[in-house]
Image (spheres, rainbow, N blue to C red):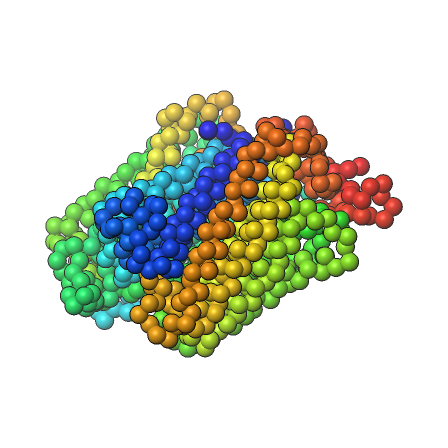
Amino acid sequence: MFSLDHKVIGIQYLITGFLFLLFGFALMTLMRWQLAYPLQPIPFVGNLFGPERAPGGIMLPEFYNQLGAMHGTVMVFLATVPIIVGGFGNFLVPLQIGAPDMAFPKLNMLSYWSFVVGGIVMLVSFFVPGGAAQSGWTSYPPLADIMPIGQTIWLFGMVFLITSSLLGAINFIVTIVQLRTPGMTWMRLPYFVWAQFVSAFLLLLAFPPLEVAAILQLMDRIAGTSFFLPSGLVVSGQIVTGLTGQAAGRLASGGGNPLLWQHLFWFLGHPEVYVLILPAMGIVAEIIANNTRRPLWGYRAMVSSAVFIGFMSLIVWAHHMYITGMGTTLAAFFQTTTMIISIPSVIILTSLFVSLWGASIRFTTPMLFALAFLPMFGIGGLTGLPLGLAGSDTQLHDTYYVIAHFHYVVAPGTIFAMFAGVYYWYPKATGRQMNTVLGTIHFWGSFVCMNLIFMPMFLQGLGGMNRRLYDGGLQYLHNAEFLKWHIPISMAAWTLGLFQIPFLLNFFGSIKWGTAVGQNPWNATTLEWSAPSPARHGNFERPPVVRRPAYEYSVPGAPRDFTPQDAD
Amino acid sequence: MQIPYVVDTRPDTGLYNGKLGVWLFLASEVMLFGGLFSAYVLLRMGAPVWPRHALNVPMAAMNTAVLIASSMTMVMAWASLKMRQWTRARGYLAATLFFGAIFLVVKFFEYSEHLRAGENPAHSMFFAIYYTLTGVHMLHLIAGMLAIAYFLGPGARMMRQAPEQFTNRIEAVGLYWHFVDLIWIFLFPTLYLV
């Protein structure tokens, strides 16, 4: 439970994260019922939610909003980041750089438990009067300022999650800078380590402004300030007053500024997107190099692209705010930086595609997921370009097009990379292989369902369907012909859930029944495969000495088609 | 395998792990206070009027002097440890703690004076940002005092068992302490003078 070993903490992160992933998915299945069959009672579980959430099993709009806000929060802060950074990062980074552990094992344990506490706080918020936060995962004021107590609890939960990420980020950077084994120079690092390194810097520098935003919103909600409440704010025909009975945002001091929240939030929010995608690219790069049996094409270009993405991602945030009225000068700046940041992403994706060129590919289960990642992330990324331009964003903002766009990046993108990583490194963690047949079923089922879910959403969004309507937009005529698409999308979403059953069976069953394998079943070159499977506390007997770059596959004249980094 | 560079420095970076960790933590703290100061600028730019000279400058000036003095005693504590002068080091650490406490007492009088006059956080935007900025700073100061108290109390055993590591830890706490001091150097003119 309270282990200090980075591998144990990594697996704890991974399993907790996958539980939250399932929970976030469950929230979404309820929403999908409401969208496909609005105002009809939820089958089977409808009566469990009680009259204040779903009287007679029919979902109330407030409950739908809670599900939406918490689906986003859980998926981003409690599932994806903990799995891909906390889970894979913790497990792999020390092994791949030849270190015995993370630099600060106790801090590592602390950040895991801080994450768990934050997660529990978030879950508890469903059971307080008024329910969980319902202002979206972005918690925009002034709405969030005047919502029930669940929003306050959301903010406290975020403080724990931010603390967890900050401690983790410090730990990753120190580990990578200080604990690289002799011979492990920067240009010999596996690409996954580079991706984690850049992500850690983003977490370190981008999260504090969100903490500032959370502090200010807490002051608004608890101490009666009006940082985010403009003066004379009218809600439902009444002027909003603060705790003390004074009109919020009194003129004497100047009214508050709701845009301030958006700036602070998206200063984190956008780098967070790259925290989600960079380690995913890292995982995919490792698996592609291994299964094409060739060095990564353009390793140096990929590394500099990742670093460049890191810098640029800190100055693109306001492309989420084009329609807030912030002005065309700012919009011009931010759409320029947004177009620039797409270049390094394309360089990385292109390098990965070129790595496949002419190779004799091994279609293992992890490779299937890694291969699917490329076009899925490509679709997600390219459909983001119209959103990055102020003109077309005015049309598309807050429609289902946006939902389709970012889900293509994180769902068949990042989550596929996570699955690929689980199949690939499972033998390292357990000493056993996962089943290929179940893995193939899991892959094809997920791949088809993901596209059935998100592809029609592009059309719905182009038709102008707003993403925040709890009945999917029944009362609007302009997208009436797209309403029926909600039904096949929901069917596909529920089927996607069914296709995760083979994965769960495979994951837990293979601990016992999986084929036992040696320490390097994939014939890979990076250092984690030079440690025993499973590696014991301390990882290596003595520090491995690195003699060559990370991906020496098919070197002419070498005895085998792979040469480990620490081979003589 | 043991974790390397816990105490001694890595040749190519010239750092031990803890020192790099603290510097990175301070980088994130810069972003935290940077965000708060940016919020201050934005809110003040948008305000039709902004109160001036609403705060007690002599008290804050005194607190500034107190914090600068505490930073000096903090350095002296580390220097004494480098020379392995235990008793002097403890004295300097205690003095740092004492100066920190004086700061809190002065701040307490300042706060209660304003609160008596009805100038609470909900009073106006100026006092809202005043309490937020100084409050977050004060929390940092209290955290630093807790760390120093730990090294004077239960953490002091390490002083004789692993002197080099203990000295490193005091250096790390000192870096943080100077940073908190530095934040006040920015807060003082921002809130009290301009």
The reply to whether residue A373 is in sight is yes
Quadrant in the rendering for residue A32: bottom left
Rendered view: B64 above or below A308: above
Rendered view: A276 above or below A480: above
Q: Quadrant of the N terminus of chain B?
A: top right
Quadrant in the rendering for residue A95: top right
Rendered view: B42 above or below A158: below
- Where in the figure is residue A101, as x and y percent of width and height? 58, 34
User: What residue do we see at 20% from left, 55% from top?
Assistant: A224
Q: Quadrant of the C terminus of chain B?
A: bottom left
The reply to whether residue A139 is in sight is no
Q: Is residue A53 left or right of residue A187?
A: left
Q: Is residue A258 left or right of residue A358?
A: left
Give the farthest residue toward the right. A557
Q: A154 or B63: which is nearer to us?
A: A154
- Where in the figure is residue A541, as x and y percent of width and height? 67, 27
User: What residue do we see at 30% from left, 36% from top?
Assistant: B98
Q: How many marks?
A: 0
User: What residue do we see at 75% from left, 49% from top?
Assistant: A293
User: What residue do we see at 18% from left, 62% from top?
Assistant: A240
Q: Is residue A85 left or right of residue B58?
A: right
Quadrant in the rendering for residue A465: bottom left
- Where in the figure is residue A228, as x and y percent of width and height? 28, 61
Q: B174 or A500: which is nearer to us?
A: A500
- Where in the figure is residue A277, as x and y percent of width and height? 54, 55
Q: Is residue A309 left or right of residue A66?
A: right
Rendered view: A461 above or below A108: below
Q: A230 or A466: which is nearer to us?
A: A466
Q: A270 or B118: which is nearer to us?
A: A270
